[in-house]
Structures are given as C-alpha cells and as structure tokens.
Amino acid sequence: MALFLKYFSGIQGNSCNRVSYPTRTMCVLQGTSVDISCTYSHPPNQRLNYKYWFKWRATQEPSDLQSDSEYERRAEYPVEETGRSTLRITDLRHTDSAEYRFTFKTSKRKWKGSLHGTTLTVTGLRVEVTPVATVTEGQRVTLTCITSCPLADKPSYIWYQNNGSVTGSENPENQLVLDPVGPQHAGNYSCSVRNYPHLRSPEETLTVQYAPKTTAVSVSHSGEIAEGSSVTLSCSSDANPAANYTWFKEHDDSVGESGQSYTITNITSELGGHYYCHAHNAIGHQKSTSLQIIITDNCSCKNRRCLTGHHTPPHLPLDEALPDSEYDDVLHLTNRSSPAAQREPIEEQDDIYTDLRKDADQTSELYSTIK
C-alpha cells in the first residue's frame, strides 16, 4: 500500500517528482481570462528538459496547449519561476471547459501527468423570470441571474432594463425583485457581473398585463357641429393587452357601435348629447369621461359662414330682398361709409347683421341713390 501511494505522488525512494495544484476546480465567466497554476519539483541533480500544460483527453496523447489550434494566441505561460508554472487562457469559451494538467521531463524521468489536475468550467449568464415571463400588474416577480456553476469570490451583479442600468440594482445577491410589478417594469432585462459590464446575459422579456387606464374620448370637430355634417368620435386608452371599445350615449343604452372610432353621418339635433366609451380587456375595464356634442342649425350660429342664400338684412326699409349684385353693392358701400373704427373688410366682422342695423339710415339713403 505504501508503494502504491508513493507511485501516485511521484515519490520513488529518496528522489521524487512532484506536481501540486492549489485549486482543483474553477468556475470562470465566459469572455474573461483565467490563470491556472501549479507547483512542481524534481531531484536537484536532474536537468529539466521541458515542461508544458495540456488539455486532458482520455483518448489522446498529451500535447503542449500552446501548439493546439483551438488555443492559438489564447494560451500562454506568463509566470515561469523555478518550481512554479501558470497557464493563462484568455477570451474563454464554453469549449474551454475541461481538465488541465501539467507535465515535465528531466534528464532521467518524465512526469506523465497521470494525476488529476484543475477542472475548469466556463459559464455564461442567463436571466430567469419567476413565476413566468408574462404577469399581471400587482404580482411579485423575481429575476435571477443564473450561472452554470458558482463564480468565485461571490461577485456583485448589475441589472439592466432596455439597455439602461436599473437604479440601485447592484447587489451581492443574483436576484432582482419587483414587488408589486407595474407597467413601468415591462421590458427587456439582462444582467452582468460587476467589473464586466460588457459581458451581459442575453435579454429576457418581461410582459406586464394591466387593465385599461387613462381612457378618453376625442372628436374630429371643435366647437359646435352643424346639422347634416359628419362627426367622428375616437376612444383611446393605455392597456395591455390592447383594449376593445363600446360606445354609449348618456341616458340611452349602447349606441350599438364598437371599435376605437364611432362616426355619425348626416347628424341631427336629436343625436346631440353626451357620449362616452367603455374600454375593456381580459384584465379589467374603464369608462371614459363623457364628451358633449352640440348640434346647431346652419343659420342660427354666430358665425359668418352661416350667412348664405338670399337673406334680407333686418331693419331695412325694403319691401323685398335685393338682387345679389345690388345686395353686394349695399354691403360694400355700407362698409366704406362706416366710421373709421368700423372700416374693415366685411368678411372680418363678427356679426354682419349688427353692423347693418347700426347703419340702417345710411343704407336706406344709399339704396335710394342706387335706385
């Protein structure tokens, strides 16, 4: 039994070859670098011929890692001291996960590297969302930054939402808790290890569903609406999933229309009133405030556009309406004969009938002149 132990320790009689690995397992982040070291010894009266590191493969003979095409310009031996050797591998890849051993040969004996060396595991990062990636507003959500093995030195983690870091997210723990979760938390999340912010995990999407909010009605016209015209009402809301809409008129049942827009054509005074919409989805519903629709007669509004056709100006001492050409002359002359403060283009006056009443006497005289 003693001879067996001496064989595997590299000890033979008073002379021995020895290799020791201070770390037997290592977990390192993908894309970073790692130093794997060992100490070795041999009888002082034996000359060292060569030494190197190799990736242990059960079916292959050892070969210097620096000559391996998979490690070209990535494997080096930066520390070369008597009795100590270090293997440095840069830009680590998942395929670098393996057991690494050291071997050397003296003028009399070769260390075959038959004992176990250092096992390296290269891990990436990924985000896991619990309970699920699609949740309802108000739930508790936990995001976990996961590695395939425990990283050394218990690093701090940084969280990102839509490529921006989450305020106060640096945490020695690998979790980000959202409780309660809200619409503002929806987005794409990733994580990184402190000191390696450029090595982020793939993004994981968190979807937050919620009932309609800020439901409101808008109209395609502003102010009063003339009879016979068309008007379109639109309903909007913030909801996820998108809301469906139903239209209502106050003191009436549903107007029988659904959809985000509701158009009333050839509108009449009976259709005036207060309208509102009802937004709803699988999570909940919300009623908008009402919007009043006022319908006016074409010529009852106080707007110059209502003055159409052959309407006789009031208070004129005329037995019949003027022909178009003479009516235009009267309006033109009246405007020119008005006091200076009222000398404005007739189309810019707010109420043409008011101006005509003020100048009734002058208009009569002008009309007599025209006759």
Image (cartoon, rainbow, N blue to C red):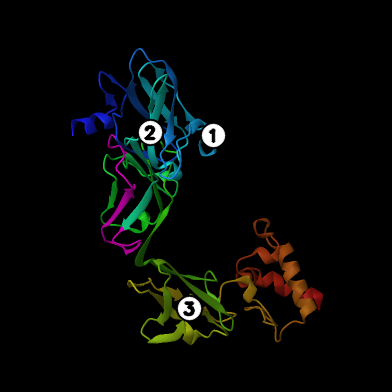
Depth check: give the residue in front, 122 or 170.
122
CA distance for labels 2 and 1: 18 Å
Q: Amino acid at mark 1?
A: Glu
Mark carried by residue 259: 3
Q: Write the residue at 41% across / 24% down.
A: 105
Depth check: give the residue in front, 138 or 81.
81
Q: Quadrant of the C terminus?
A: bottom right
Contact flag, marks 1 and 3 (Cβ < 8 Å): no
125 versus 32 height, above or below: below
316 versus 36 height, above or below: below
Residue at the extreme left of the image, as rendered: 1
Q: Earlier in the sequence, mark 1 or mark 3?
A: 1
Question: Which range is magenta?
Answer: 130-156
Mark carried by residue 236: none
Q: Amino acid at mark 3?
A: Gly
Foreground disc of the pair 1, 3 = 1
Foreground disc of the pair 2, 3 = 2
**Looking at the picture, how far across and down is residue 141, in whole percent?**
28, 57
Depth check: give the residue in front, 230 or 255.
255
Q: Earlier in the sequence, mark 2 or mark 1?
A: 1
Q: Write the residue at 78% across / 77% down.
A: 326
258 versus 168 height, above or below: below
Q: SS for tag 1?
A: loop
**Looking at the picture, how far across and down is residue 298, in whole percent?**
59, 80
Q: On the picture, is 266 further left or further right than 367?
A: left
**Looking at the picture, how far across and down is residue 55, in whole percent?**
43, 37
Q: Earlier in the sequence, mark 2 or mark 3?
A: 2
Contact flag, marks 2 and 1 (Cβ < 8 Å): no
Q: Which residue is mark 1?
A: 72
Depth check: give the residue in front, 98 or 280.
98
